[in-house]
Image (cartoon, rainbow, N blue to C red):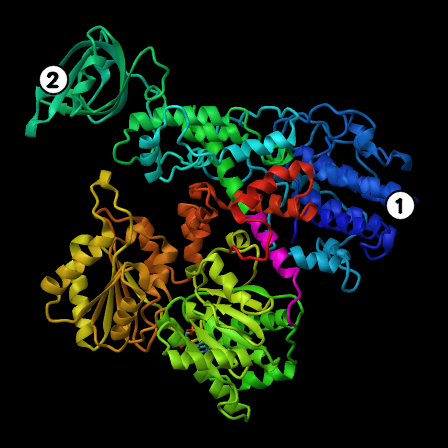
């Protein structure tokens, strides 16, 4: 169910298009009267704050007035006013409670010009904002004095109201807004609807004090500076300046520039969004007498002595002793003898860091330090810990960063429309950026992160919606098939389709029948039967005298598809009494011999080949289709934006179906794939046995090796997987990609000397990878040692054991993907997850839960949405994953949708900066594909 505000915006926009003649609703102008009441009821149930309720009252009153206005120009003005109020362009009427709802005479239809309003300033939630007087249409609304403070109580108050004007279901509003053949509202609905059929769909009015369990900042709301009116040109050029290189900033020459570049810091913008990877709280000053070993402390004192001694291996150690009157402490600086001059006897300095103990005395090694008169940049506050690179010290990184951030956030315009920030109590952009780099407090940091997460989500969503609209504005190929056709071919399927498969096929059939290009995501757990659905889409294209193409990320997958799809199609053809070869299917990969390739290209060009199955080879120059009706992409996350665009480009706006086995909770999918319609295969074909999963401690590896041996003795095969991660040198970790190689050596020589092992990792060439996979496929290898590259739909039915090392590093959803590699054949599957020494609760879930979507949800609860959303692809580098909880995601979705419903091209002046920012990330609204 769309939010009430979104529904209203759509209707108002439609009215505008229809010259305000009342035709947006069934019943014309008088329809608005009935609508007002139903709408208000829905909207009140979604409203959370007093000011939301008064806005609802005000708007429903305006809708009623609209129905009575004789003059269409007046009506047009009123619509502009209502939209202005919804979007916050126009401030609420003055404080007098009656002003909003007094049934104004028709001539007051243009209130914006009537009086200047004071700057809008929301009272705190539950504050003493006066409710408007009860309108006639709202019996028993609570009076201002005893208005409950929260949405929940508020709702109860409403529920206990004996009746509203007429009894009707909450759905009624929606029903009434459907209308008018195939122009007008339906069309709009289509272009922006989400098929949001979730009864718990959130309300636009939800506020952030609502349901977030996460740390609730004590800073009731972040400070927000007023926005001075500014020259739009000047604002735009502010953002353009952020693209300037960092080299050239005072103090940053080519030499430092090079080091910064190693961190990915090329432009000033890069720097603003280059956030610390953690923060350390040095705000608590401790008297030296109370300092204990193994504590994070900040201490202040006077230098009593400083001396350099030769440490082990000839390293110079500078020992500095501080005295604060209550006690002393000695800090050692290793290999930095030049610091000696900074610690003149008698100077006051601050040390921050972790304490240790040496010969019974409390010590500190390499603490953060600064002389006391300097501004507290490195100590006595929450200090940022940036990722570093060789030759750039934490000290200089912080110093440079502080300068850059200070300079370039001062006076920064904010691209986010003010009303959105107001509604959600979000902070200013410049404030948020400063706090993210140098937080004043943990609360401030929370606010800043919330803002950053929200921005990421909103832009992602608006960017996606824009893409979808542009893409679907092009005419597509209508490929209708009759019911009987579908009925006939499904009779020839080798198995009865699951209900989920039937639903997916129906949705695709309906999409492809329209002259609008389909844009659908088919999401289904490993083994849910996506191939059958894809095959039907291909057949629909062929039956409409068009062609179909399906692209897979590896040639192994492409070959697998070629075999299974050819077999499926041949079976269906025979089943319906056609010759087996009536449909020609070709396989095109990098390995296709030149002569064969030439023949295939000719066949595709002339239309004698109906279906092409392949890899990237399909999107190369020279591959042309006579009439491409449907383009299908399997394992979509393995493809980049351009590759998908290229496959589409092989036809004239073909229908697009993308498939993925990566489970992602529905709410998130609406953001991540807002440009796609979503179909979920939430049912596995019957007869699958779940994979037996066990979490094991690293000390028990031997057992798992024994188990693997026993299965191989039975003729099975096994995977051993190592996580591919960046080594974190500070934690003393080895590069685990290298570890896969090293482990392969160890396993082959020491553990399984009599078995045949293969090695697969991302640094192999595609041909090498294919060769390894092939021999595993053919059973020439017993064990495949691999990084996560095997995650993609490899189907080796004989492999039934998977051992995942370092499993605690993976998200649950990804572990689920990985374990889906086994148990695909007739043999029961086994999955062993190697945990940390101290086992975590987190992994234990894998033993119980077999549903990928449930695991994705748990992942989300535990780790936030960053990984699931892949927002880092947006190029902004926000790592706000853990702040992307369900609540923020929903808020961003609603704001984005409402914004989009009103101003899809972001043409209004107040959206100009936002548009520029979105275009910078997603490119100009061109028919490309971003998801
Ligand atoms: P995925 O969604 O992972 O791509 P596949 O399409 O490869 O799944 O299907 C997995 C296996 O299930 C295949 O062997 C396929 O033949 C089989 N299968 C698919 N649909 C059904 C069904 N409705 N009933 C029985 N088996 C099915
Ligand atoms: Mg598949």
Q: Is residue 565 visible?
A: no
- Give residue 146's position: percent from left, percent from top: 69, 29
Q: Which residues are magenta?
A: 461-477
Total number of numbered discs in the rendering: 2
Which of the 4 image quarters holds residue 363?
top left
- Return the residue nearer the eye: 503 or 631: 631
Task: Report which quarter residue 740 is drawn in.
Answer: bottom left
Instruction: List the residue tagged with mark 2.
Output: 308
Quarter of the figure with the N terminus: bottom right
The location of residue 268, given as percent across then percent down, is 45, 33
Q: Position of residue 746 (x, y in %)?
A: 13, 59
Of all residues, the one furthest to the right in this rendering is 70
Question: Cβ(mark 1) to ligand 1 < 8 Å?
Answer: no
Q: Nearer the viewer, mark 1 or mark 2?
A: 2
Where 117 falls versus 684 (above or below)?
A: above
In the rendered view, would you say 581 is above or below 593? below
Query: Could you say where residue 873 lies in the image, as x and y percent from the top left?
Result: 45, 49
Say which residue appears at 39% left-offset and 28% top-offset.
401
Residue at image point 59% right, 39% down = 914
Q: Are marks 1 and 2 in contact (CB under 8 Å)?
A: no
Q: Is residue 52 visible?
A: yes
Label 1 residue SS: helix
**The quarter of the displayed image where residue 773 is located:** bottom left
Residue designated by label 1? 72
Q: Secondary structure at mark 2?
A: strand
């Amino acid at each position: 169910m769309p939010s009430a505000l979104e529904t209203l915006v759509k209707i108002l926009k439609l009215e505008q298009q229809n010259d305000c003649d009342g035709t947006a609703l069934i019943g014309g102008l008088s329809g608005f009267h009935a609508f007002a009441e139903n709408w208000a009821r829905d909207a009140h149930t979604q409203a959370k704050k007093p000011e939301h309720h008064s806005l609802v009252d005000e708007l429903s009153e305006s809708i009623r007035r609209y129905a009575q206005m004789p003059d269409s120009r007046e009506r047009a003005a009123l619509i502009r006013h209502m939209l202005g109020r919804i979007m916050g362009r126009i401030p609420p009427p003055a404080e007098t409670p009656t002003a909003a709802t007094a049934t104004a005479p028709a001539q007051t239809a243009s209130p914006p010009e009537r009086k200047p309003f004071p700057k809008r300033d929301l009272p705190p939630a539950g504050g003493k904002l006066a409710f408007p007087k009860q309108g006639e249409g709202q019996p028993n609304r609570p009076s201002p004095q005893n208005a409950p403070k929260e949405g929940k109580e508020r709702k109860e108050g409403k529920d206990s109201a004996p009746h509203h004007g007429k009894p009707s279901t909450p759905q009624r509003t929606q029903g009434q807004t459907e209308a008018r053949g195939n122009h007008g509202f339906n069309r709009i609905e289509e272009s922006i609807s989400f098929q949001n059929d979730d009864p718990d769909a959130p309300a636009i009015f939800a506020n952030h004090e609502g349901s977030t369990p996460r740390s609730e900042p004590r800073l009731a709301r972040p400070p927000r500076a007023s926005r001075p009116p500014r020259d739009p040109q000047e604002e735009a050029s502010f953002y353009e300046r952020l693209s300037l290189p960092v080299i050239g900033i005072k103090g940053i020459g080519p030499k430092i520039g090079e080091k910064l570049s190693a961190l990915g810091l090329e432009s000033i913008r890069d720097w603003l969004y280059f956030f610390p990877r953690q923060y350390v709280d040095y705000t608590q000053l401790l008297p030296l007498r109370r300092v204990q070993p193994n504590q994070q402390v900040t201490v202040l004192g006077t230098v009593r002595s400083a001396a350099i001694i030769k440490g082990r291996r000839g390293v110079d150690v500078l020992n500095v002793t501080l005295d604060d009157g209550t006690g002393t402490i000695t800090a050692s600086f290793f290999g930095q003898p030049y610091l000696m001059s900074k610690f003149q006897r008698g100077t006051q300095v601050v040390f921050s860091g972790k304490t240790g103990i040496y010969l019974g005395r409390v010590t500190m090694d390499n603490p953060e330090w600064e002389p006391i008169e300097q501004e507290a940049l490195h100590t006595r506050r929450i200090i940022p810990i940036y990722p570093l690179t060789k030759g750039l010290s934490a000290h200089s990184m912080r110093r440079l960063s502080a300068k850059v951030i200070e300079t370039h956030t001062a006076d920064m315009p904010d691209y986010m429309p003010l009303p959105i920030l107001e509604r959600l109590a979000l902070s200013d952009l410049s404030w948020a950026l400063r706090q993210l780099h140098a937080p004043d407090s943990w609360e401030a940091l929370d606010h800043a992160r919330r803002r950053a997460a929200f921005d990421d989500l909103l832009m992602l969503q608006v960017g996606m919606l824009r893409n979808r609209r542009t893409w679907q504005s092009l005419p597509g190929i209508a490929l209708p098939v009759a019911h009987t056709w579908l009925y006939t071919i499904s009779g020839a399927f080798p198995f009865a389709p699951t209900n989920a498969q039937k639903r997916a096929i129906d949705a695709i059939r309906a999409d492809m029948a329209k002259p609008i290009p389909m844009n659908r995501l088919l999401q289904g757990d490993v083994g849910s039967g996506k191939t059958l659905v894809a095959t039907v889409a291909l057949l629909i294209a062929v039956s409409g005298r068009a062609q179909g193409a399906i692209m897979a990320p590896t040639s192994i997958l492409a070959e697998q598809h070629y075999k299974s799809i050819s077999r499926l199609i041949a079976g269906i053809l025979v089943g319906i009494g056609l010759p087996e070869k009536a449909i020609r299917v070709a396989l095109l990969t990098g390995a296709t011999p030149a002569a064969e390739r030439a023949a295939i290209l000719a066949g595709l060009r002339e239309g004698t080949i109906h279906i092409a199955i392949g890899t990237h080879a399909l999107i190369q120059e020279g591959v042309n289709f006579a009439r491409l009706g449907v383009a299908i992409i399997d394992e979509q996350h393995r493809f980049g934006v351009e590759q998908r665009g290229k496959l589409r480009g092989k036809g004239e706006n073909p229908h697009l179906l993308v498939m993925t086995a990566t489970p992602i909770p529905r709410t998130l999918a609406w953001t991540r794939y807002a440009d796609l319609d979503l179909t979920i295969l939430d049912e596995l074909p019957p007869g699958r046995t779940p994979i037996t999963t066990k979490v094991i401690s690293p000390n028990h590896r031997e057992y798992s090796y024994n188990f693997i041996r026993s299965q191989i003795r039975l003729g099975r095969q096994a995977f051993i997987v190592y996580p591919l991660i960046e080594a974190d040198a500070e934690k003393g970790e080895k590069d685990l990609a290298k570890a896969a190689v090293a482990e392969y050596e160890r396993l082959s020589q020491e553990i399984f000397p009599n078995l045949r092992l293969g090695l697969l990792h991302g640094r192999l060439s595609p041909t090498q990878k294919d060769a390894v996979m092939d021999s595993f496929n053919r059973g020439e290898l017993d064990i495949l040692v691999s990084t996560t590259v095997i995650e993609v739909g490899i189907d080796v039915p004989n492999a039934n054991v998977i051992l995942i090392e370092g499993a605690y590093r993976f998200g649950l959803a990804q572990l689920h993907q990985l374990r889906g590699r086994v148990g695909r054949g007739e043999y029961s599957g086994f999955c062993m997850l190697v945990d940390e020494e101290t086992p975590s609760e987190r992994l234990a879930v894998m033993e119980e839960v077999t549903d990928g979507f449930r695991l994705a949800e748990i992942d989300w609860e535990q780790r936030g949405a960053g990984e699931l959303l892949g927002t880092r692809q947006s190029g902004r580098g926000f790592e706000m994953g853990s702040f992307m909880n369900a609540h923020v995601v929903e808020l961003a979705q609603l704001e984005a949708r409402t914004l989009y419903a009103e101003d899809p091209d972001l043409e209004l002046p107040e959206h100009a900066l936002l548009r520029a920012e979105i275009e910078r990330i997603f490119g100009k609204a061109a028919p490309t594909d971003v998801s």
